[in-house]
Image (cartoon, rainbow, N blue to C red):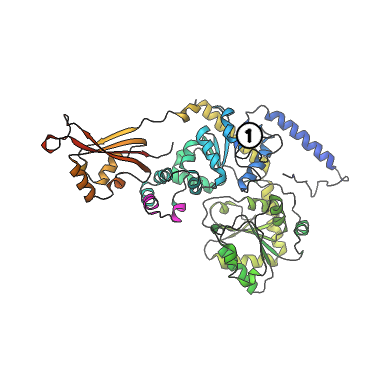
Amino acid sequence: MPRAMISGPGHATGSTGSLSVSALISAEAAMREKMTAKAAAKLDLHNFTPLPPARNGIADYAYKLMDELRALRRCVVYCDDVLASAPQGVDVRDEAQAFRYVGPHTPILHQIGNNGGHIFVLEALRRHGGIVSLHDLSLLYLYELSSPRLEPILAGMQQQDPALGALYGRQWKENRLKTAANYVLFDMVGEILSLADGVIVHSRYAMNKLRAGYGPAAAAKCTVIPHFAPVLAITSAEEARQRLSLPPDERIVLTSGFATRSKRFDWLLEALETLLQDGVALRWIHAGEERPDEYPLREELAKHPRLRDVATITGYVSEAELDAYIAAADLVVNLRFPSVGESSGTLARAFSAGRCCIVNDTAAYAEIPREAVVHIPIFDTVPALVRAMEALLHDGELRTLFGDRARHYAGSTLAMRHIAKSYSDFIDATHARTQAAGRQAAERHASPPAPVRVEIDGADALEPADLRRRLSGIEGPFEALFWFDSADDIARYSLDKPGFLQGAFGPHVTIDTVRFRSRPAARGRRVAPGGGSAVGLSVLGRAYGWQ
């Protein structure tokens, strides 16, 4: 990863001036050496995360964070790609071999987001515990990708909301009906909060959302560390436009990242088309990849003929190319609604570049200082967006004012050195607390419970809902025995109450085997008419839940 040269007032960029480049490099090396000596006194930090070249913003985030953390403590990283790129001095190890290095006293940091690149990280959290940096407050998609069966997902949905979880779970399991509401109602964060020793989130909104959904005990594990703003290798608009072969005099509106529905391109396209109709000259560039299954960006763009003629969708771009597009822009637009509290790495980059940015006034974005960014309401958004962009595109001094304040915010509150120290301090405090409490890894690896056996006499006198209440405490493998007076009674009950087994068990339960069993009449048990043996319906299965 390239490291930026420091330039600007008070900093020399050549052989003349108060400090030479070689002197700056020597000073930085001396500081690094001093900090490395301090780092040696701390326990090694073991990281589980995707890394570049994975097309994953969290991979880039983890790289830059470790590049700063390694000055505070020695870092090693476990990845599913042993050829991945890591900062100098950080060993990359195969995540499947982590058991050789990780023990009950090891500080561990997991970077978890809502995509398939984090499946191995979730599995590592289950095996080893540790601290989680939680980048997304909705992980349902991750669980869909990582769970070999549907039932563990349905168990998580029911844990979050028993009534809604059972309702939506049955629709999903029995009717193959899954709606967008699933992703709003069920965030699947419960297991993370249960397993993690500590959780890092990036906004107060995220903290409050976890507190509201999971209670004060879960929130007590959490701390807020904002998304850092990396130093960019290029911040000059002129240089960036030359590199990208963009005209020097065009007014450029930029969006970036994966094109998803929640980034509200529908609002933006309508606003840009309106500006063009009103005679405002501009070019719109989307520096990112289209995901047609999530939002058909090119298809929607085709409905706006004026905008189509001045629009560019680049496809996936490298980190260096993204930085250049940000530096080349006059306006950076980063809309998000509905938001589940996520932060934006590209927005933080735009702050570092000193670019004027427009965001929605919602969730974590509402916490950004008003002087550093232009906030747009989530109601009547298109007219507000039109007015804001028209004013800013015509007023270079106003854009510069917002850009300068954004750069100051990036260099102070969001500075890498502050964020890395906050990480390191929280890791040390959490590790000390869990060690003092005597928490051992053996607690995470308790022997699996023996299969539970539940017998219910007189099942024919009970409704499926009554059976379900009797079975509600089961978790793990089980055998449920429903006793009837005769096989005829079983047949009659099944006809009177079709689907009673589904009614007796929640959607988080798998039924593996159903068979008949008989038992001799015994004292205290019901006896079949005529003195015969009672007949049982034996159900073998597994009730899934959080470990």
Task: Using residue 154 as the reference point, say whether residue 503 is left or right of it.
Answer: left
User: Could you tell me which quadrant the C terminus lies in?
Assistant: top left
Tell me if I can see residue 189 in this picture.
Answer: yes
Name the spot of residue 361 as percent of width and height, x first: 56, 57
Name the spot of residue 102 as percent of width and height, x first: 57, 29
Residue 176, magenta (yes or no): yes
Camera-side residue: 243 or 431? Answer: 243
Task: Using residue 477 as the reference point, say whether residue 371 is left or right of it.
Answer: right
What is the chief secondary structure element of the magenta stretch?
helix
Camera-side residue: 242 or 507? Answer: 507
Amino acid carrying mark 1 in the image: Arg
Badge 1 marks a residue whose secondary structure is strand
Farthest-out residue, left: 530
Does 68 appear above or below 139?
A: above
> Pointer 1: what residue?
93
Tell me if I can see residue 413 in this picture.
Answer: no
Does 410 appear above or below 430?
A: below
User: Splitting the image into 4 quarters, where does residue 314 fall?
Assistant: bottom right
Which residue is found at the position 27% from the left and 47% from the top? 500
Which residue is found at the position 75% from the left and 32% from the top? 33
Name the spot of residue 121 as percent of width and height, x first: 55, 39
Name the spot of residue 127 as percent of width and height, x first: 51, 33
Magenta segment: 169-184
Residue 355, magenta (yes or no): no
User: Could you tell me which quadrant the N terminus lies in?
Assistant: top right
User: Splitting the image into 4 quarters, where does residue 51 fall?
Assistant: top right
